Image: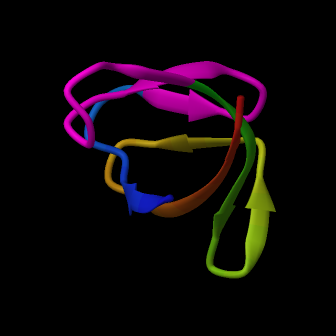
Amino acid sequence: MMGRVERGVIRAGETVEIVGIREETLSVSVKRIEAFQKTLTFARVGLAIACVLGR
């Protein structure tokens, strides 16, 4: 999944909730975060990132 961090901090290994794609909220874990062709341990507000997600 790709997008921009709108609030707070996202960290690899965290469980996050995805809203707005389906009627129900989807809980997934963040396996990896990437930005500018580098793997990150976390991302802050304003950063455009790609996340590899798992269940």
Which residue extends farthest front? 23
Is 16 or 44 nearer to us in this picture?
16
Q: Look at 48% across and 29% down and name the residue there.
A: 9
Q: Is 13 displayed left or right of 46 in the figure?
A: right
Total marks in image:
0
Is 40 or 55 nearer to us in this picture?
55
Expressed as whole percent of the image width and height from the top left, the position of residue 3 reads 37, 60
Which stretch did the figure color magenta?
9-27
Q: Is 1 displayed left or right of 35 in the figure?
A: left
Q: Is 30 displayed left or right of 2 in the figure?
A: right
Asked if residue 10 is among those painted magenta in the image, a careful observer would answer yes
Is 34 or 17 nearer to us in this picture?
17
Asked if residue 25 is among those painted magenta in the image, a careful observer would answer yes
Which residue extends farthest bottom? 37
The quadrant of the image that shows the C terminus is: top right
Expressed as whole percent of the image width and height from the top left, the position of residue 53 reads 67, 44
Q: Look at 33% across and 19% down and name the residue there.
A: 25
How is the protein colored in the picture? Answer: rainbow
Q: Is 8 displayed left or right of 41 in the figure?
A: left
Expressed as whole percent of the image width and height from the top left, the position of residue 1 reads 50, 58
Q: Is residue 49 above or below residue 17?
A: below
Quadrant of res 19: top left
Expressed as whole percent of the image width and height from the top left, the position of residue 30 reads 68, 36
Q: Is residue 46 above or below residue 11?
A: below
Quadrant of res 39: bottom right
Quadrant of res 45: top left
Q: Look at 54% across and 32% down and name the residue there.
A: 10
